[in-house]
Image: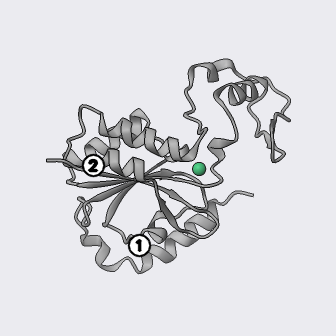
Amino acid sequence: MSVLSEVLAANEVYSASFGDKANLPMPPKRRFAILTCMDARLDPAKFAGLAEGDAHVIRNAGGRASDDAIRSLVISYKLLGTREWFVIHHTDCGMETFTNEIIRNLLANSLETAKFDGQNWHDVGRGPGSRAGEYMEFLTINNLEQSVIDDVERIRSHPLVPNNIAIYGFIYDVKNGRLIEVPEANRIGRATT
Ligand SMILES: [Zn+2]
């Protein structure tokens, strides 16, 4: 059942031909960062052409500009020299399928994995659940374009983010692998000196 042995076997193969990557410096060579969703269908190294050492990739549910994502971006430029940031949300994101209230109710019912019928989430666990979800902000998505705009705006207006960093907003299409520009987000994220 566990993937543990598969992962360790894959790692053996990877490390066997590690080669020159041993000498990579810590700062990202191409001086940029990507904030995107954890969705398993997205592989930033492939869709954005990254090799080891090229860029920072910060991922969370939705690719949202949470306090923790901004913490990483601040470190990314202040200590490691990135100059351009991409905020990339995507079509068919799971974060569009629920609200804070929905996931809080599911969690209050049980801590087992819920089921999605294509429309609604149903809790099928026996419980007990926990009400601790009441204190968690899940940063769900109501409108994809707006969520990209909101996150670029949140990063742009953060007091620890300098104006000379360019922030780009895109939506990744899970049906064809393309990045679709969100012009309003790019306008807000434009670098000024
Ligand atoms: Zn997603």
Q: Is residue 120 left or right of residue 181?
A: right
Give the residue type that dot 1 points to.
Gly
Of marks 2 and 1, which one's residue comes earlier in the chain? 1
The front one of 187 and 93 is: 187
The structure residue drawn at horizontal position 75% and vertical position 29%, both measured from the top left corner, is: 106
Image position, residue 119 (x, y; %): 81, 43
- Label at residue 76: 2
Up the image or down, 136 lies above or below 95; here it is above
The front one of 193 and 79 is: 193
Task: Report crowding for label 1: few under 14, some 14 to 19, many 20 or more residues within 10 A (C-alpha).
Answer: few
Question: In which quadrant will I find the N terminus?
Answer: bottom right
The structure residue drawn at horizontal position 39% and vertical position 70%, both measured from the top left corner, is: 50
Q: Which colour style is shown? A: one colour
Q: Which of the 4 image quarters holds residue 112?
A: top right
The residue singled out by tag 1 in the image is 49
Image position, residue 94 (x, y; %): 66, 46
Q: Which of the 4 image quarters holds residue 161?
A: top left
